[in-house]
Amino acid sequence: MQTGLVMTAAKDQAPPRSWVCRVLADDGKGAMVTLGARPIRIGAGRNCDLILTDPQVSREHAELTAGPDGIHIRDLGSTNGTFWQGSRISAIAVPGGSTVVFGNTHVQLLAADTPVLPPSPRDRFGAMVGKSLAMRELYSILELAAPTDVTVLVEGESGTGKELVARALHDHSERAGVPLVVVDCSAVSEELLDSQLFGHLRGAFTGANRDRKGAFVEASGGTLFLDELGELPLSCQTKLLRVLEDQTVLPVGSDRRVNVNTRVVAATHRRLADMVARGEFRFDLYYRLAVVHVHLPPLRDRPEDLAVLVKSFYEGRGVASGPIAGPNLERLQKHAWPGNVRELRNVLERAWALSGPGKSRFEDLQLWLQASTVEAASGPRIDTSMPFKEAKEVWNDEFEVRYLAEVYERFGRNITHAAEHAGINRRHFRTLLRKHDIIDS
């Protein structure tokens, strides 16, 4: 999980020469070491640069080296593994702000001059729920950012609750008396985006039968949430930057700019920094938006939040949950959660509807979890009674089903985004989904 304050910087600014490797602790005072020109070693041994007391950490667990593209991590054959974003790694380069797990210990990698905020004592902020250290560190940033007018960029997988961040920031600000305006940049055609955001005059184009204020004017005095900002075309990015700088908009068909007073919170499931590097997103707009830059952790990285999340959904439904423990909770903790918190909510709603009368308590629920993601790490059972070729085909089919289903769910069942991530033609991706009965048509 990455959280932190990202200040504006010049396009040609050199990457940091040193990093701080900080053990995440409840009191915000975990052990730390600086990673500079020479590599450092992390482990339980006395000769390591960062010594961890976790019994799941090997004597010499991993080696870290600073590079121009981030921090290079090499697992040194540890018993219990090194993990990043839920996956076990052997060697990888990760960006600053990343949290890496060695055994059971979370270590955050920050630029040496990055301020460190103690985690918030609360277990929820707005409609966001979670008592994990990752979430409480997120709350500590949002608590400080909310009362200000600073722009905020929220990155995170589909279903992690990016709109909840925007609503919490708005509701905890002095702008709360004005409605939050939401624009999904992926749901508006490029031809109509200017009108949607900046407004238009009657007769400005075919179908413009009346004047339209546009989202920036509608949100003036309040907050504008730009969802899926990564889908914004370059032509519109230039205009958005001008609005953020001047707080004025030029409606389509007008030659007179309109003053606004609009705070912007933007969100995307993409990594905008990578899009900037590929020339797909303006670097100046990126830095203008990412004055405060937060990353929402995926649910698979915070299994300790499952019980409190389930309880919050029960509270929202007004139904007694009973103890949130036992086999049902264990099943949830083994699930991969490609759809994150949204998927958890859907699983519970399905269970409430199909478990039968008188079985609303958590321990009585029949949970329907996609077979493609339950205990995914263990893989399908190898049937050695079959010839090698047939057994391999079964394994390959199982992988294909799991991969397609998880990527499809991860991107909110958006075939275009899922196919792009998978590097597969959109039509072929849809064909594969049909082949494995993941979709009907």
Image: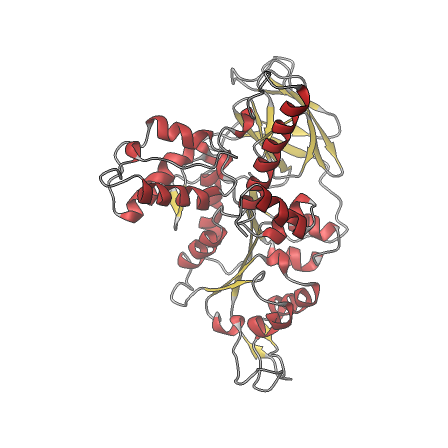
Is 62 situated left or right of 337 in this image?
right
Question: With 32 as the anchor, is 283 left or right in this view?
Answer: right
Estimate the x, y position of residue 253 in percent, counting from the top left.
Answer: 63, 83
Residue positioned 31% across, 35% down in the render: 365
Q: Position of residue 410 (x, y in %)?
A: 55, 44
Which color scheme is applied?
Answer: secondary structure
Taking depth in this image into account, of 397 and 96 the one nearest to the observer is 397
Q: Position of residue 152 (x, y in %)?
A: 55, 55
Please, is residue 349 above or below residue 210 in the view?
above
Q: Which residue is located at x 40 percent, y 35 percent?
A: 306
Frontmost residue, 249 versus 319: 319
373 vs 191: above or below: above
Q: In the picture shown, does residue 225 fall above or below 329?
A: below
Q: What is the x, y in percent for residue 68?
A: 76, 38
* Residue 325, image quadrant: top left
Relative to residue 64, is residue 340 depicted above or below? Answer: below
| Whether residue 328 can be seen here | yes
Q: Identify the residue shown where x is 49% and y is 46%.
A: 160
Q: 374 or 102: which is nearer to us? A: 374
Residue at image coords 70%, 57% = 281
